[in-house]
Amino acid sequence: MLKAAEAIVRFLVEEGVDTVFGYPGGYIVHVYEALRKSDIRHILVRQESAAAHSANGYARVSGKTGVCIATSGPGATNLITGIATAYMDSIPLVVLTGQVPSSMIGRDVFQEADITGATESFTKHNYLVKDASQLPRIFREAFHIASTGRPGPVLIDLPHDIQAEDIPCNYPETVQITGYKPTVKGHAGQIKRALKAIAESERPLILAGGGVNLSRAHAELLTFSEKSGIPVVHTLMGKGAFPSNHAHYVGMIGTHGFSYANEAVRMADLMVFIGARIADRTAGGTQILPENMSIVHIDVDPAEIGKIVGTQVPLVGDLGQILKKMNEKIKRKDTSAWLETLGTMKTEETYKTGSLVNPKKAIRVLSGKLNDTAIMVADVGQNQFWTARHFDDLPGRKFMTSGGMGTMGYGIPAAVGAKIAAPERQVVAVTGDGGFQMSIFELGTIAANNIDLKMVLFNNSHLGMVREIQKRVFGQTGHIALEKNPNFVMLASAYGIKGVRVTSDDELEAAFDQALGHKGPFLVECVVDPDESTL
Amino acid sequence: MSVNNRHVLSVLVENQAGVLSRVSGLFSRRGYNIDSLSVGVTEDPAISRMTIVVKGDRYILEQIKKQLNKLIDVIKVIDLDKDKSVFRELMLIKVNARENSRASIIEIVDIFRASVVDVSNETLTVEMTGDEDKIEAFISLMKPYGIREIVRTGLTALERGSKEIKSYKKYGEED
Ligand SMILES: Cc1ncc(C[n+]2csc(CCOP(=O)(O)OP(=O)(O)O)c2C)c(N)n1
């Protein structure tokens, strides 16, 4: 027999958890006490939303399930944005929350919140533990559910008294969930149909989505494209799925994608969607029209197939496994004319120099200075697309952003998680002045743990993307401004974090050299014209 | 196919707290319309079975089935074929029944093979089971007497013949 809280920590160790992100409180103290005595590293964030975002960044870089932890009531509700963000991007998380004692549940006692009810629609599954003896099964299931099939967050709500009970501590080796058996292998008949559709097409195009990054099917995708001769476009979440320096690489599509990549979609007579859910922001830029093209849709989640656009050939299963099978049979198509057409459509980016920093050029310059395994985390807003469009995601590098939810304030804490997962890799977080201030408190976490993270802050004194929309739609400018922005470099310095402020393109090289050369966190604030466009 | 067909889904779920909320929440969140939902435990006490009557075109129905299948607690979802299944609903109905009308009400009750389960000076309470048409017909015959209260369980259904829901594959399961 073991105290449940201690058993829980053992289960975490059993699952290979070495780091958790969290914030304590009265109704999670038993677990915290057990954590304190363990070898698991606890990163104290400065607000719970950051715990979920950091666990998210950690998961995306490590390939493991991220774990975050908070107390009941306000601690749990502060996690919500982070949980929803992870859900929308299919990031595996196990979220632990304290809960009021079992006997008090439902009586609106101090710091009680129905967190399982609140997160029902944006967790893959959740548990309110009512019987401490079920904890081994619940933890085993939670990690299994979070990380298999289409990954996602799973929440376990732990009443205070349950944490203190004594339970037998045998962790089950296998999981038996009757209603949960994700399809892994692709259907042989459907694979045959997909190959036939590809063989019959003239201008086939692969659309790679975030699923490729999540399932780490990069090698299989590369082989698939090379063996078949089919060129590749990708979504925002699919950035990094296919090497950008490859002859078959076309570019990013979507409302904020490149127009030549969107044009390529319109010209294609067959699309192979691979781990892309064809969200509105993807389909919007291209007007993917099934009546004009055949569609093969490969995804681990059958509910994504046919949800937005009709599909001729649905193929459910693990991307890597399905592509491997297709690679055995696929015949080389003569796509040389098609590739040539696409090649001529591509436009080279030119970077104008103005009186302030050109953020697109800044990302370009930074991209050139980063090493082969750098991780780039973009926040949300104009800065997100400046980064997505101008950061060169060479193979080995990684790009991450909050795509599905578009959560401002994601960038900094996600980058903290990324750096903790891979201390040997360069990690950069790019944010706007709005998003930076939404997670500004994490400077405390960064300083306290000396997280060697480089922050690039594009300061346009506005919520740039919103301002751009307002201007376009209502012809109005300057309605909402971020007035009285602080002196960001001084603010960082108050935390003991070094920084420089850059006001023109000429200073970029030196600033980035200084940042990358510095051991420890560093802030580069770039002053940007509020009228700078996203595209 | 008509645009808004009615479908009767039979859904096996884990008999656990929160399941009903997850299923009904899914319908409201995604904007699917439920006509009725009934639930009860099955031959296996660990498993409950829901009968859900929904309206929707083929796309909506596909989405409902896929989204239901994504719930971890959902074990199986089948769309019952109207011609191959038995549909029943139970209704309790309280109608005004004074001395002068009591006999004629009981006559109708007998024709419908319903039964009187409670009598008072002013009312009769009738229990009846049947498919929807039968229940609607009975209600319309009771209207002239004055209906006080109606309570209905919602439709429950089972496939005819020896086939069981368990013999169906889970959605997307390999064959
Ligand atoms: C939490 C949250 N609140 C509001 C929004 C809506 N929103 C999208 S972009 C944006 C502006 C972001 O401004 P800033 O962080 O300064 O970045 P910029 O667009 O200027 O690069 C806003 C408010 C959001 N995405 N997330």
Image (cartoon, grey):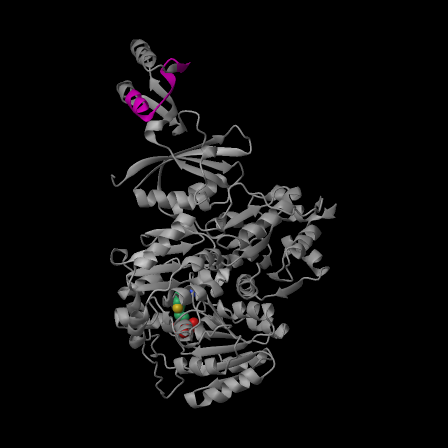
Residue A166 drawn above or below residue A83: above
Q: In this view, does A512 lie to the left or right of A161?
A: left
Residue A58 drawn above or below residue B152: below
> Which residues fall within the magenta stretch?
B116-138
Q: Residue at x 57, y 58 (%)?
A: A65
Quarter of the C terminus of chain A within the rendering: bottom left
Expressed as whole percent of the image width and height from the top left, the position of residue A252 reads 37, 69
Q: Which residue is drawn at 55% across and 43% down?
A: A177
Q: Identify the image quadrant of residue A267.
A: bottom left
Question: Can residue A485 be seen?
Answer: no
Q: Is residue A534 left or right of residue A64?
A: left
Which of these two is toward me, A78 or B4? B4
Expressed as whole percent of the image width and height from the top left, the position of residue B157 reads 40, 28
Q: Identify the image quadrant of residue A469.
A: bottom left
Q: Identify the image quadrant of residue B168.
A: top left
Expressed as whole percent of the image width and height from the top left, the position of residue A74 reads 55, 56
Splitting the image into four quadrants, where does ligand 1 fall? bottom left
Question: Can residue A143 be seen?
Answer: yes
| Residue A50 forms part of the magenta stretch | no
Farthest residue toward the right? A1
Residue B9 drawn above or below residue A190: above
Quarter of the N terminus of chain A within the rendering: top right
Residue A524 drawn above or below residue B136: below
Expressed as whole percent of the image width and height from the top left, the position of residue A187 reads 43, 48
Q: Residue at x 63, y 57 (%)?
A: A25
Total residue callouts: 0
Q: In this view, does A51 lie to the left or right of A221?
A: right
| Residue B130 forms part of the magenta stretch | yes
